[in-house]
Amino acid sequence: MNTSTSVDRYVLGATDVVQVSVWRNEDLSVSVPVRPDGMISVPLIGDVQASGRTPTDLANDIEEQLARYIREPNVSVVVTSMGSHEYNDRVRVTGAVQQPMSVPHRAGMTVLDVVLGAGGATPFASLNNAMLYRKIDGDVVAIPIRLEDILNDGDVRTNYAIRPGDILSVPERSF
């Protein structure tokens, strides 16, 4: 199972703001938000699909479309505001923890970091029955986490790296 942390490429989404710069064509350079329909408006070519694409893919598409109007356009796209990832890239901790929470993802974050950030487990937690829910290729996968082993025995085999969008659920034990 792939439990690596890498967030390979930034993918644009609604409410992001991008600076589209066309070299030696300041009148074609704009700073625009990605609209709720996923499009941005660029001078000369009009609407271009931005949502779901990387800045590099978007720049290449704009270059191709501008080539009909100007010779050898050189376009760069820089994300100046990353509003779309405010909720998509959060990590959530629920269940038998002192402070259930939703926090921004940070590189290097692990299961233990998230549990400690939530104030630790409650006395009623069923620590070795915790689950990490992760979306992989459109499906939600449940990854068993052995929190008791991590916290009490120093066995960090299930102290996986956290990815944006992960949900860690710590159930209560049944009496």
Image: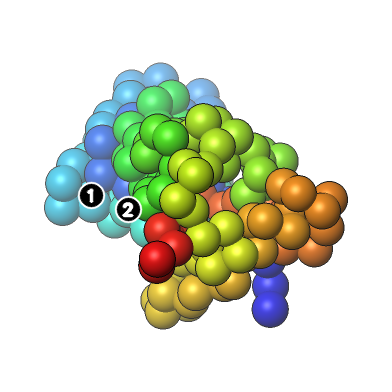
* Helix, strand or loop at mark 1: strand
Q: Quadrant of residue 53?
A: bottom left
Estimate the spatial distance between the alpha carbons at disc 2 and disc 1, rounded to whole Å: 7 Å
Determine contact: label 2, label 1, CB under 8 Å: yes
Looking at this view, name the residue that lies furthest to the top: 26
Density class for disc 1 (Cα within 10 Å; few <14, some 14-19, many ≥20) is some
Which quadrant does the N terminus fall into?
Answer: bottom right
Residue 39 is tagged as 1
Density class for disc 2 (Cα within 10 Å; few <14, some 14-19, many ≥20) is many
- Residue closest to the eye, 131 or 49: 131
Image position, residue 153 (x, y; %): 82, 53
The residue indicated by pointer 2 is 51
Amino acid type at mark 2: Ser
- Looking at marks 2 and 1 on the same chain, the residue that comes earlier in the sequence is marked by 1
Image position, residue 52 (x, y; %): 37, 58
Q: Is residue 122 left or right of residue 111?
A: left
Looking at this view, name the residue that lies furthest to the right: 154
Residue 50 visible? The answer is no
Looking at this view, name the residue that lies furthest to the front: 175
Q: Is residue 111 left or right of residue 89?
A: right
